[in-house]
Amino acid sequence: MTTLLRLASALAVLLLLARPALAADAATLAGASPLTRDALARLRADVSTIHDPVIKAATEDALFNPATCVAHRANLGQADKRDIINRLVAEGLADPGDGLVDGLFPALPGEGGPCPHLPQPFAAAPGGNAGSHHSWPGGLPVHEAFNAQSAKDFAAAYRAIDGVVLDGQDDLIAAAPLWHDWAKALLFIWRPDGGLPPEVSLGGHGPDGDYRTGAHHILGLAEAMARRMPADLIIVQACAHQAPERGKPDRLVHWLRAAAIIARVDPVAAGYLAPAQAGGLTLPGMTETGTVPRWWSACLIHAQSDHNWVYAEPAVEDADALLRQLAPRFGVDAGDPARYTWGYRHAVLSHLGAARVQSLAAQGGLDALTQALTQLRAQGVF
């Protein structure tokens, strides 16, 4: 065999063994996605409606500045991380055990300095972790755009049908959905095989049971606190996973306490929490019977608007099963996880979305979905 043939043979082997698109290519997939591009345009329009200059500037920076600083991680050393975790555990806001350091403090570019950066662009992040809703590159902007639209629609309906007065709350209604899931870009970092890390929980337990929730919720609050966002916005942001019941604010109190420890701020001095008459802490405006907090309507709307997952999680389950079933028709080997995920699953979902895949199959069966995939194949999407 000549030297040239040996080189050609070696190159062919290397190409066969070459790893598929890795995490760095998530941005490429998201950038080529019409769904993600449309979602980002919607989010920019949402930010443009915010009147408060502090909220507007910080939100635009967090979502669209590729060099944005992760404020709650600024100048945070290893000793600081240990102190934060020790305090969370000691105060019953986190379960002791392995994984808390990596789960709350993933490695960042500029780690330990004044301006650490996100490990990936916001636009390329998934909207959920492995197997969850919007778990493809660019899924996060799509998920946020949906929830932001839901918040606007709920507000319009309450105004038009129930006569609710929401004067002065429009900025809270617009901004809270944009901040709530922001930390998913911090935590849900793409692995070489196209998978995602597990998410730790925070919040501990309380009188009504299990208060634990996904770390992205708490870290999003910590980031907003570290950026000195208005107290009303942070309280409304905390309502995402469950609005407080009348007389039972404990769940949100736990979440805000945990976020304040991570952000290294005093939640009472900052106005996120207030002393309760019976001792302990409560939410501002809930300290006296018969009062209605000024942020109450926005809180309830935000809690309702954060439910895109109710539709989107079953959609991902169906889409994954359908794509795996059709993979052999397109010569895709599901036995090679990395190539299957990056070269097929993520590519298809970034263009169609799971809900679209599900609806195509529901309306036209596998033939309709096969036709859509054939078109994507012809376009070089996968």
Image (spheres, rainbow, N blue to C red):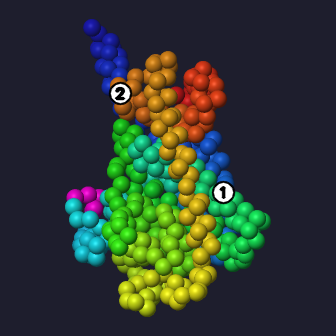
Q: Is residue 31 visible?
A: yes
- Inspect the image, locate mark 2, and give the three-letter code of the amino acid beneath it: Asp
For the point 44% across and 35% down, which residue is it?
342
Question: Percent from the top left, x then y, of residue 162?
Answer: 74, 68
Question: Percent from the top left, x then y, of residue 106?
Answer: 34, 58
For residue 144, above or below residue 72: above
Residue 93 occupies quadrant: bottom left
Q: Is residue 232 left or right of residue 279?
A: right
Asked whether the beta carbons under mark 1 and mark 2 sit within 8 Å of each other, the answer is: no
For the point 61% across and 66% down, which residue is it?
301
Q: Is residue 68 visible?
A: no
Report, in whole angstroms, how far the alpha carbon at label 1 lies from the one at label 2: 38 Å
For residue 217, above or below residue 327: below
Magenta span: predominant SS is helix
Mark in the foreground, 1 or 2: 1
In the image, residue 120 lies in the stretch drawn in magenta: no
Residue 108 occupies quadrant: bottom left
Q: Is residue 78 left or right of residue 278?
A: left
Q: Secondary structure at mark 1?
A: helix
Q: Name the quarter where the N terminus is drawn.
A: top left
What residue sits right under mark 1 in the picture? 149
User: Foreground: 236 or 117?
Assistant: 236
What residue sits right under mark 2 in the picture? 336
Question: Percent from the top left, x then y, of residue 157?
Answer: 73, 62
For the point 68% across and 71% down, which residue is it?
170
Q: Which range is magenta?
A: 98-102
Q: Secondary structure at mark 2?
A: loop
For residue 141, above or below residue 317: below
Residue 352 occupies quadrant: top right
Q: Residue furthest left?
A: 97
- Inspect the image, locate mark 1, and give the three-letter code of the amino acid beneath it: Gln
